[in-house]
Amino acid sequence: MRMDNVQRLVARRVEKLLEQLASLVARGRTGEDLPAIGVTLHLAHGHQVSGELLDYLPKEAVLLALKKEALSRSESVTYVDLASVVAVTVTDAGRLAQVPGMVRPLPTRSDLQKLAEQLAKGITEQFWPSEGTLGGQVLRFEVDWVGLDDEPGRLAMELALNVAAHALRELGRSEKHGRDAIRSIATVRFVKGKETAASLDGDTGTVTVGPGGAPTVQAFRKGFTAGR
């Protein structure tokens, strides 16, 4: 599972997680082509047991096949008292994407447009709170969706928006003349590019959004101050 997708996983109580994983196992028993679910159960007092999840009895017990090849080549199974399970490790996190409710939904174009507006408004209110009410300058985040309105593009855009907002806030708080520097930026544009990076030209910041490694707050902050 890619790191950006791992970050979209949601937290679950141990009991709820096992219940949802068992529902996937049950679908497999009906003939649906689904991968086996490998887990490690971390037990009270530091013990642990690993195997393929076979069944789950809510509030009572978990049944595991002890070897990776499971029951097709082994008759060894372990029955675990649910009350003794304090944590669960899923061997291949990518399989969680097939479990309903385990992954946050992908952001839509509308979601990201609202996020851009909220982030820009929050920064404006933090560093020049009176401007908006007096009809003066407010920071704007503008998104050019050409080449970005698909799943990879929206995921990259979500990350770029958040990193840019963090970088601008850090710039405003940390630089010797940071407040003046951030207040001199009127617009930050987000456009498709070969890589994700930030730059500044006059009063306009540009964030190019591309595939590859995750951008850093430090790199964006440096980009927003380049040439000053």
Image (cartoon, rainbow, N blue to C red):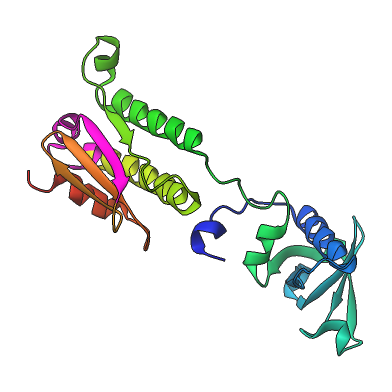
Point out the stretch of residues depicted in magenta: 172-192
**Residue 136 placement (x, y as % from top left):** 21, 15
The number of numbered badges drawn on the structure is: 0
**Residue 80 placement (x, y as % from top left):** 88, 70
Quadrant where the N terminus lies? bottom right
In the rendered structure, does residue 25 fall within the stretch colored magenta?
A: no
The answer to whether 90 appears left or right of 132 in the picture is: right
Q: Residue at x 35, y 26 (%)?
A: 121
Query: Does residue 215 lie above or below 65 as drawn?
Result: above
Q: Residue at x 52, y 39 (%)?
A: 108
Residue extending furthest toward the bottom: 73
Quadrant where the C terminus lies? top left
Query: Does residue 221 lie above or below 76 as drawn?
Result: above
**Residue 92 placement (x, y as % from top left):** 65, 71
Query: Does residue 225 lie above or below 210 as drawn?
Result: above
For the residue pair 95 and 179, the one nearer the viewer reads as 95
Residue extending furthest toward the left: 228
For the residue pair 202 and 6, the one nearer the viewer reads as 202
Residue extending furthest toward the front: 146
The answer to whether 132 appears left or right of 90 in the picture is: left
